[in-house]
Image: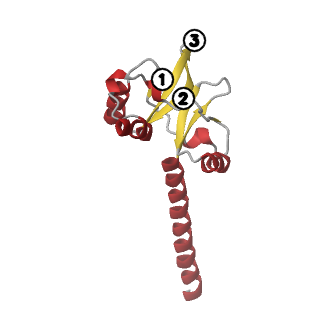
Amino acid sequence: MSAGEYCTRNVVIMEKTESVREAIGLMRSHHVGDVVVVDRQEDVPVPLGILTDRDIVMEMLAKDVDPGAVTVGDVMSYELLTVNEDTKIPDALKLMRSKGIRRLPVVNQHGGLEGILSVDDIVELIAEQMSDIAVLVSHEMQHEEKLRSG
């Protein structure tokens, strides 16, 4: 199980010169809590940073800054951590836990953005696995009952 297999491929992206107000509009219309800030290199989006809904609240709204007067590049997190597509889920989760982050952009071998892996994606994966285990246990019990009664 790799980050590339379980990441969300539809990532909302922006360039750092765009306004935070535009970012807020994109987050709202796409129902996401972040935008990945990219630089286009030969038309390939390469992640530079990330702007989250929390960044907007903590850095702007709490300080009464006008979102239309500030660019995404002024507020985004520049210390961006990424993982490669082939990074194993447990390794990505350890990185997220150690750095206290909920989202990791997923890049290909050339550094181009491929998706974003979130805690929500990992929770969904674990829930699916737990459901599969529950079905397995149920089927095992039914199979055993048939063997003993027949």
Question: What colouring method underlies this structural image?
Answer: secondary structure
Q: Which numbered disc, 3 or 1, marks the residue closer to the eye? A: 1
**Left or right of 26 in this view: 149:** right
Give residue 52's quadrant in the image: top left
Picture layout, residue 124 above or below residue 20: below
Q: Position of residue 93 (x, y in %)?
A: 62, 49
Picture layout, residue 80 above or below residue 112: below
* Spatial separation of the CA atoms under disc 3 and disc 1: 20 Å
Picture layout, residue 123 above or below residue 21: below
Packing grade of label 2 (10 A; few <14, some 14-19, many >=20) is many
Question: Which residue is identified by label 3?
Answer: 42
Under tag 3, what secondary structure? loop
Q: Position of residue 92 (x, y in %)?
A: 64, 45
Picture layout, residue 127 above or below residue 22: below
* Spatial separation of the CA atoms under disc 2 and disc 3: 18 Å
The label number, if any, that marks residue 49 in the structure image: 2
* Spatial separation of the CA atoms under disc 1 and disc 2: 8 Å
Under tag 1, what secondary structure? helix
Packing grade of label 3 (10 A; few <14, some 14-19, many >=20) is few
Query: Which of pointers 3 and 1 lies earlier in the amino acid sequence?
Result: 3
Query: Which of pointers 2 and 3 lies earlier in the amino acid sequence?
Result: 3
- Determine if residue 31 is in view: no
Q: Position of residue 22 (x, y in %)?
A: 34, 25
**Circle 3: residue type:** Glu
- Circles 1 and 2, Cβ within 8 Å, touching? The answer is yes
Question: Which residue is identified by label 1?
Answer: 73
**Circle 2: residue type:** Gly
